[in-house]
Amino acid sequence: MATPWAGLIVALGMNPIVNTLIAVGLILVNSTIWAYVGAYIFKNFKIHTVAEIRADDNLEEAPAHANA
């Protein structure tokens, strides 16, 4: 979390304040819009836990070990 703040402080220190704040505002609006677009697109995707993925891997490996 420190890196965005450090970058903002450097941007404010090296550029005119008004231009930097306009850029920050545009980035904020753009990021918010794309976050909602991404949430809308992926809202129906099933989230798999690590336990589910590992259980699926164990099921696929079981027959191979049984034949050995």
Image (cartoon, rainbow, N blue to C red):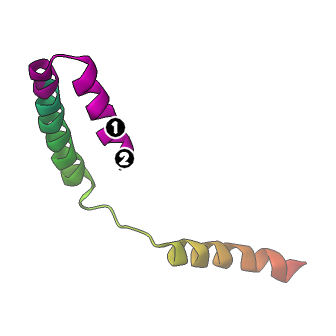
Q: For marks 1 and 2, give the CA distance.
A: 6 Å
Q: As rendered, which of 19 and 44 lies closer to the eye?
A: 19
Q: Which mark is residue 20?
A: none
Is residue 53 shown left or right of residue 28? right
Tell me the residue at 20%/39% (across/down). 31
Q: Residue at x 46, y 73 (%)?
A: 49
Q: Is residue 60 above or below residue 7?
A: below
* Residue 4 placement, left or right of 57: left
List x then y, in percent, for residue 9: 27, 33
> What range of the chain is rendered magenta?
1-22
- Compare residues 27 and 39 and report the one nearer the observer: 27
Magenta span: chief secondary structure: helix
User: Would residue 62 be found to the left or right of residue 29 on screen?
Assistant: right
Q: Which residue is mark 1?
A: 6
Q: Residue drawn at (32%, 61%), measured in percent from left and top?
A: 45
In this picture, is 61 found above or below 40?
below
Quarter residue 46 falls in: bottom left
Q: Are marks 1 and 2 in contact (CB under 8 Å)?
A: yes
Residue 12: quarter of image = top left
Residue 66 vs residue 11: left or right? right
Q: Residue at 74% of width from left, 80% of height from top?
A: 62
- On the image, numbered disc 2 is attached to which residue? 2
Amino acid of disc 1: Ala
**Which sits in the foreground, 29 or 51?**
29
Amino acid carrying label 2: it is Ala
